[in-house]
Image (cartoon, rainbow, N blue to C red):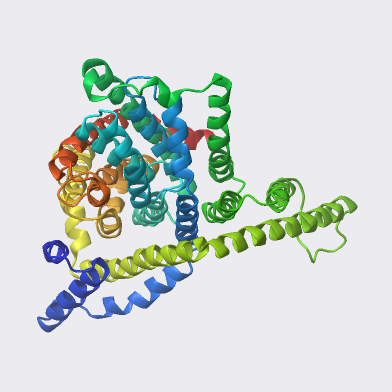
Amino acid sequence: MFASVCGFLMAGFPVAFTLGGSALLFAGIGYALGIFDFSFVGFLTQRIFGVMSNDVLLAVPLFVFMGVMLERSRVAEDLLESMGKLFGSLRGGLGISVSIVGALLAASTGIVGATVVTMGLLSLPTMLKRGYDPSLTAGTICAAGTLGQIIPPSIVLVLLGDVISSAYQTSQLAQGVYAPETISVGDLFAGALMPGLMLVGLYILYQIGMAVFRPASSPALPPEDVYFERRRDLYLMASRTLLPPALLIVAVLGSILSGIATPTEAAALGAVGATFLAGWRIERGSPLPIYAGGAGLTGLLILVQFFDLRYGRDLPSITDMLAMSAAALASAALLWGFGVCLWRCYRSGTLGEVSRSTMEVSAMVFVILIGAALFSLVFRGFGGDETVSSALSSMPGGVVGAMVLVMGVMFALGFFLDFIEIIFIVVPLVAPVLLGMGLDPIWLGVMMAVNLQTSFLTPPFGFALFYLRGVAPPEVTTMHIYKGVFPFVMLQLLALILLALFPQTATWLPSLLK
């Protein structure tokens, strides 16, 4: 059954219909042979209802909206230009700039396709024109674009966190723990932050190493390209470009890590903040509504922390009543600024594009989720989960051997399958078994996330490679791209090994925040 799914996917069939169709096909064959109970298929409606009523998964369309809105408002273009001038006077400076901008876009957009295409269009011609090696250029852009899969807020972490949370509860119930602990998406965000930054550091060290040992591969920009009459003007330009997305990143991640907001609430905050930023960039008219809306949003976040703003209570205190009045004014200011920004985005055509892209990506994710739910039900109906459990439990080396096997299988599947299929098909089968062996759920989730990130870079079906190939000039061949990403795949495997040897990299920050 699993092999058939892989075969259909490699033949080009749509993912969701491949999963659901293969499940129904094998369920029919099994029922005809008398070896499958068709009542398993009947549980699909409950699974779909569970998806519909899952508040955590609401973060997916909101984070997608946030990312697409920032991408359409040309944040990446401004960041690349500023970082290029800031680091361009150094050997390898453009490569370092691309890695830093990739990390910033990862923390603000989290959409690999948009990031790779945008940086490919903007930085690839510049780097080639300045004498950068085509393979190094292609590899740098592809690798920086995939950082959105591991640096929170990431759609991968949202989906993986939901699956890991369910698997963790399943493993505890199987061990007789009837008051199971829970793992949230916010815990996984906190766990992935340090490994994500470690990966950025490895990319930058590689750029520096190439500049030192192969100087011809990454020359410095000519002085006239980075010339400013006063150094202060350069820093001022960079701060103006960096400050708005940095504030948005701090607001979204900070609200999650500090416990002020759930990931879904933080995603809504990010979507509103991205709309403010887009409205400000699209039309440089009167900034008063945007300032008022931003102040209202900030005021609401502060008020909600220190006062009980619930209406309908018996005899609220004078202080709470004053806080409610202030919150009403802040809400009015927020609505005014948000409405003005939406109108500006609508008039420019940006809002329609963003809404359509958000709908397409969200529909793709959730229809795959439904297909994967049917696949897992039929797989369990045939006893596949028991087979996987017994295979992993009997592995030589115990939990270490089982973990190495799972990581190897996920890495190999990354050559042919997308991260969404791997999350929804493989992780629910293996995670309960591994967690039952005593592994830390946050560390396991981050290990899987780093492993899944390599699926965007590994040929022949690495999506980042396809995205860059689509916008690369003719002189950059497919072989240049494949050759360029190889060192970065090795760096990701090195990060995976370091994470395995030092689990505290993933577990330290979540334990600190509890």
Horizontal and vertical percent position of residue 497: 25, 31
Write the residue at 37% across / 71% down.
47
**Residue 84 sits in quarter:** top left
Horizontal and vertical percent position of residue 513: 54, 37
- Relative to residue 64, is residue 464 depicted above or below? above
Residue sitting nearer the eye, 371 or 107: 107
Image quarter of the C terminus: top right
- Relative to residue 474, is residue 62 depicted above or below? below
- Relative to residue 386, is residue 508 depicted above or below? above
Left-right relation of 218 to 229: left
Image quarter of the N terminus: bottom left
Residue sitting nearer the eye, 473 or 261: 473
Horizontal and vertical percent position of residue 169: 40, 55
Question: How many marks on residues?
Answer: 0
Furthest residue to the left?
Answer: 33
Residue 147 appears in the figure: yes
Residue sitting nearer the eye, 346 or 442: 346
Furthest residue to the bottom?
Answer: 32
**Residue 361 sits in quarter:** bottom left
Write the residue at 42% across / 23% down.
224
Furthest residue to the top?
Answer: 212
Residue 184 appears in the figure: no
Write the residue at 16% across / 58% down.
387
Residue sitting nearer the eye, 514 or 342: 342
Horizontal and vertical percent position of residue 215: 24, 18
